[in-house]
Image (cartoon, rainbow, N blue to C red):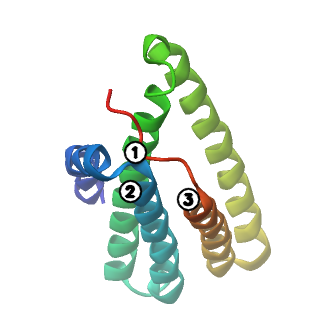
Amino acid sequence: FGVIGVCGAFVAPVSGRFTDRSGARPVVLGGSLMVALSFLVLWAGGTWSLVAVGLGVLLIDIGMNGALIANQTRAYALVPGARGRINTVLFTTLFVFGALGAFAGSQAFLMVGWPGVCAVGLVFSALAVLVAARDRHGPAAPI
């Protein structure tokens, strides 16, 4: 699965170019949709198919990395002279909500098993899709 995880690194330049051309919103929306799809794949076949697990992990990795690059572009454009501080806030927020998601997923696993983990991931990624779809900000300014 480590080899599958490397795919996210290849997404970064593609996501960056697409964000520069089209703005952050479609990239964040596409990444969020990809993560939601990954949890559907994992829910459908994650308990019996190694291929489903591999595909789910690949979709999560590509979707998360693509959305992250787009959000970084958007955040850095806010105050170009404060990238270090903005990056601190961005990644602190990312890790705090990641920890909350991990906690919710582990509690769901204790209560209902693998389907609960997938349901939590699907709910959180669906919320991300809704937020991205409602975003009315224009394209991020070039860095």
| Residue 32 percent location from the top left of the image | 49, 63
Q: Nearer the viewer, residue 32 or 5?
A: 32
| Residue 3 percent location from the top left of the image | 22, 56
Label 3 neighbourhood size at 10 Å, few (<14), some (14-19), many (20+)? many
| Identity, as a three-letter code, of the amino acid under mark 3 | Ala
| Identity, as a three-letter code, of the amino acid under mark 1 | Ala
Locate the C terminus by quadrant: top left
User: Where is mark 1, residue-wise?
Assistant: 70
Q: Residue at the spot x=45%, y=17% of the render?
A: 83
Q: Quadrant of residue 27?
A: bottom left
**What is the secondary structure assignment of the residue under circle 1?**
helix
Q: Quadrant of residue 85?
A: top right
Mark 1 / mark 3, whichever is N-terminal: 1
Q: Quick check: marks 3 and 2 in contact, CB under 8 Å? A: no
Q: Nearer the viewer, residue 97 or 23?
A: 23
**What is the secondary structure assignment of the residue under circle 2?**
helix
Q: Give the Cα separation between the discs numbered 3 and 2.
A: 9 Å
Label 2 neighbourhood size at 10 Å, few (<14), some (14-19), many (20+)? many
Mark 3 / mark 2, whichever is N-terminal: 2
Q: Quick check: marks 1 and 2 in contact, CB under 8 Å? A: yes
| Identity, as a three-letter code, of the amino acid under mark 2 | Val
The residue furthest top is 81
| Residue 37 percent location from the top left of the image | 46, 77
| Residue 123 percent location from the top left of the image | 67, 70
Q: Residue at the spot x=47%, y=47% of the render?
A: 138
User: Where is mark 2, residue-wise?
Assistant: 27
User: Where is mark 3, residue-wise?
Assistant: 132
Q: Give the Cα separation between the discs numbered 1 and 2.
A: 6 Å
Mark 1 / mark 2, whichever is N-terminal: 2
